[in-house]
Image (cartoon, helix red, strand yellow):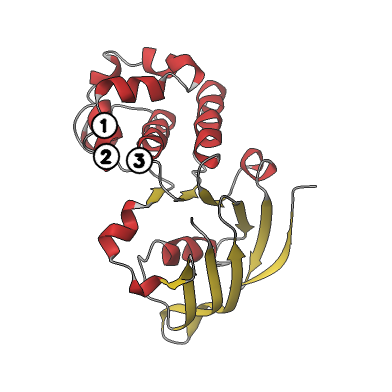
Amino acid sequence: TGRIVFENGTFHYKEGEEVLRDFNLAIEPGENLAVVGHTGAGKSSVAKLIARFYEFQKGRILIDGRDIRSFNLEEYRRRLGVVSQVPFLFSGTVADNIRYARREAGDGEILKMVRRIGGGEWLETLPQGLDSQVGERGARLSMGQRQLVALMRVLVQQPAIFILDEATASIDPFTEWQIQQALDLILQCSTSILIAHRLSTVRSADRIIVMEDGGTIEEGNHQ
């Protein structure tokens, strides 16, 4: 169901330089949690520990009441959708990249999903629609288009837990509107952790936590 609990979590990248100290947090199933704070506050570390990119040194992280270390890593990650600050795209078509997490997804299903975002207008800006080549690392697409493809990949995957490390890159208003629509669709069906840099993302979150020096100093909704 995607319930996430940190119990007295302590984590460091380097010995003696703790990023999180006795960190406690409970995220309910289906909750949209925004995490804000200055650079180095520990925001991205929380996301990386949930994705099991790193091993924590003390405490526990529980997913649905089970220790995160007890899951089969490959099976666990199938239930995770992650969009990083600079989304990674593989050389190939837009459709190839969208179905990366669910190879069995057909073009019809992908097209139906794409049309849920602004009627699929963003696809019309690409020379060959779903069959457009994205280039190495998505070089032929704008940053906004890359983000949309990465979000579509998550939408097709339908994960239980969604992690967004929101990009700070400047995006034109048309693409930003489409990105917000895609985000809203994902947030409806998953427990979400949003590492937020933009106010528009924070506003719609169920709860916001403000981090400083590896701990939480404030929490509440936007108001």
Residue neighbourhood size for the residue with mark 1, other residues' Cα within 10 Å, grouped as few (<14), some (14–19), many (≥20): some
| Amino acid at circle 2 | Arg
Which residue is painted at 47% across and 22% down in the image?
Answer: 116
* Residue of label 3: 157
Image-based side of 164 in relation to 126, left or right: right
Which residue is painted at 58% across and 76% down in the image?
Answer: 23
Residue 37, position in %: x, y?
Answer: 63, 60
| Amino acid at circle 3 | Gln
Instruction: Report if the CB atoms under discs 2 and 3 are less than 8 Å apart.
Output: yes
**Dot 3 lies on which element?**
helix
**Dot 1 lies on which element?**
loop
Residue 13, position in %: x, y?
Answer: 41, 76
130, 78: nearer the viewer: 78
| Amino acid at circle 1 | Ala
Q: How far apart are marks 3 and 1 (CA)?
A: 9 Å
* Residue of label 2: 102
Image-based side of 162 in relation to 137, left or right: right
Residue 27, position in %: x, y?
Answer: 59, 61
Image-based side of 137 in relation to 211, left or right: left
Tell me, for residue 105, which label it has, or none. Answer: 1
Which residue is painted at 31% across and 52% down in the image?
Answer: 78
Which residue is painted at 48% across and 71% down in the image?
Answer: 62
Residue 61, position in %: x, y?
Answer: 48, 73
Query: Which of pointers 3 and 1 lies earlier in the amino acid sequence?
Result: 1
Instruction: Report if the CB atoms under discs 1 and 2 are less than 8 Å apart.
Output: yes
With respect to residue 144, does 52 lie above or below?
A: below
Q: Quadrant of residue 141?
A: top left
Q: Can residue 134 be seen in this view?
A: no
Q: Distance between the residues labelled 1 and 2?
A: 6 Å
Tell me, for residue 143, which label it has, or none. Answer: none
